[in-house]
Image (cartoon, rainbow, N blue to C red):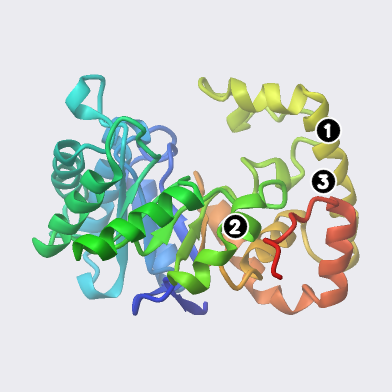
Amino acid sequence: MEYRRLGKAGLKVSEFSFGAWVTFGKQVGEDDATSIMGYAYDNGINFFDNAEGYESGNAEVVMGEALKALNWSRDSYAVSSKVFWGGEKPTQKGLSAKHVTDAAHAALKRLQVDYLDLYFCHRPDIDTPIEETVRAMHNLITQGKVLYWGTSEWTAQQLTEAYAIARQEHLTPPTMEQPEYNLFRREKVEAEFLPLYNLFGLGTTIWSPLASGILTGKYNDGIPADSRMNLPGYEWLKKRLDSEKGKEELAKVGKLAVLAKEIGLPIHHLALLWCNANPNVSTVILGASRLSQLKDNLEALKHKAKLTPDVLARIEEIMGNKPAAPQRY
């Protein structure tokens, strides 16, 4: 396992990290979470991602119980939460100063920690001024409740506004963004955010590196019975694959699988290593509902040398979707 700085911050996070997502509290209970997180930690993972919206907070409860059972030294790992969807009442959602503050304290209780290493705005909130959110995050940092704050799925323009407000008002700016990034979702990380990496030192903690399982190849021949696509709430994924665009994506996955086999990799390892090869990715967040899945994904790191420039060029040829970088004159 190698470690990378979180953008320009001094914090170093493992190149592969672990995210609870909705599996904790639904498919994964405390005992399994303890086993999965323990294996992750023992193999070098030091960042564990979560959110108040994952299973209505139950994912954080499960992770908190696992952290208590594992009893690691607090200075040996980083844990995060994300704020936006806390409940149905007006004060329980969004990025108002009240909800940002209340959600942080609730996350600390559920995760059973004294502070959050990373705290994300889960989505942009068009009903709350960005200045209010920036100030709320800054206050949590000055109180010692949060160390680094960031965003998830914000635009470059919204991030730039947050940085400008922080500089003007002498507040703490965001350190990182958590965008979706995989072979099918590239625009933000590779083009839109490109000026921000050098200008602000933006870090990225990317999610869905396997495109909700599409890049594992398991949907090429139909939908397996134990697939997440058969779970309630995943109808959108099934609809995506049934579309013309989805069929085109599956055709590309088939070609990627042939290339992966040629160089001696399963396709999902190829997809994970491709994300990891981007120097602007601070960490690739893995998800797993079973220990065997995590073990398998971590094996990919042994084969980084197989993603040669020639292989990367062949991947580009198959995908045909490299976004254009901002023009320089």
Q: CA distance from mark 3 to mark 2?
A: 21 Å
Up/down of 119 relative to 57, above or below: below
Residue marked by disc 1: 221
Q: Circle 2 sits in a helix, a strand or a loop, which is it?
A: helix
Amino acid residing under circle 1: Asp
Q: CA distance from mark 3 to mark 1?
A: 11 Å
Q: Quadrant of the C terminus?
A: bottom right
Residue marked by disc 3: 253
Q: Circle 3 sits in a helix, a strand or a loop, which is it?
A: helix
Amino acid residing under circle 3: Val
Residue 313 lies left or right of residue 281; in this view the side is right
Residue 32 lies left or right of residue 69; in this view the side is right
Mark before the other along the chain sequence, 3 or 1: 1
The residue lying at 28 percent from left, 74 percent from top is: 76
Q: Using the image as rendered, state which of residue 165 and residue 95 is in the foreground.
A: 165
Residue 102 sits in which quadrant? top left
Q: Which mark is residue 4?
A: none
Q: Which mark is residue 189?
A: 2
